[in-house]
Image (cartoon, helix red, strand yellow):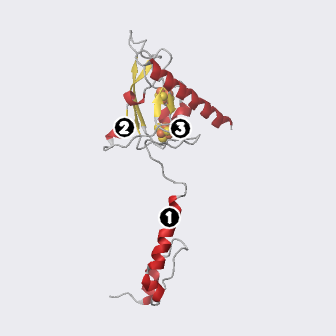
Amino acid sequence: MPACGGDLKRYMMQPLTNRAKVLDLKPLNFMERLYLPNIMNGMWITLRHIFKKKATIQYPEEKRPFSPVFRGLHVLNRDEEGRERCTACGLCAVACPAEAITMEAAERMKGEEHLYREEKYAARYEINMLRCIFCGLCEEACPKDAIYLSETFAPANFTRKGFIYGKPDLLIPDPKNEPGDFSLAKGQIEDRKEKVRKDVTA
Ligand code: SF4
Ligand code: SF4
């Protein structure tokens, strides 16, 4: 049965903004039918924009500076001897509101003192970057100076699995193998610590 006028009114959607324009359906005059003035007007607008400062940049060659409060991908810290600082206490996972962190703890064996700083370590440590909201609560919760957020964002990937970062993706370089990269990563962690400290005391 066709809906009556009252029903139609009830089902009509309300506009979301007040920017709706009423269409003027009167016939075009001679100048409007020429179209030339409107084409010239459009070209003038284009020409004006050519000389304006561009809003776009040539990424990835050019990069915008991050905001001082930017929080990107996580890194797992090592001590000066290259030992993993994480002791798998689980506080970061408990603090995480997105339940993005998964870990499995293991006991350090005799002869592994050069690998792990504490008697317990994370045999598996994973962060699901698709769940993470980059709030930084994990780094605030960590009592072992073991996890920080960096100024890098997750690159695109074709699979969901590619966004689950394990220890090899998260750990900073080992000073025994890559001393230069280790120093660089440590410097970035120190910068991050300073920013967090300022953030907390502000
Ligand atoms: S940044 Fe926030 S959401 Fe992401 S892993 Fe850490 S606590 Fe979880
Ligand atoms: S990163 Fe820090 S808070 Fe998380 S398990 Fe390791 S030591 Fe604990």
Q: Residue at the location (43% across, 85% down)?
A: 33
Residue closer to the observer: 118 or 178: 178
Secondary element at tag 2: strand
Q: Nearer the viewer, mark 2 or mark 1?
A: 1
- Residue 63 lies left or right of residue 200; in this view the side is left
What is the spatial separation of the Cα atoms under label 2 and label 1, in whole angstroms? 47 Å
What is the spatial separation of the Cα atoms under label 3 and label 2, in whole angstroms? 17 Å
Residue closer to the observer: 184 or 11: 184
Residue 42 rendering spot, x and y as whole percentages? 48, 71
Q: Amino acid at mark 1?
A: Leu
Above or below: residue 124 compared with residue 65: above
- Contact flag, marks 2 and 1 (Cβ < 8 Å): no
Work out which quarter of the rendered image holds the C terminus and state it: top right
Residue 148 rendering spot, x and y as whole percentages? 51, 31
Residue 183 rendering spot, x and y as whole percentages? 50, 21
Residue occupied by mark 2: 164
Answer few, some or many: residues within 10 Å of disc 3's Cα (few below 14, many 20 plus, some between 14 and 19): many
Q: Residue at the location (39% across, 30% down)?
A: 169
Q: Of marks 3 and 2, which one's residue comes earlier in the chain?
A: 3
Q: Is residue 163 visible?
A: yes
Q: Amino acid at mark 2?
A: Ile
Residue occupied by mark 3: 136
Q: Which mark is residue 47?
A: 1
Q: Amino acid at mark 3?
A: Gly
Residue 52, image quadrant: bottom right
Secondary element at tag 3: loop
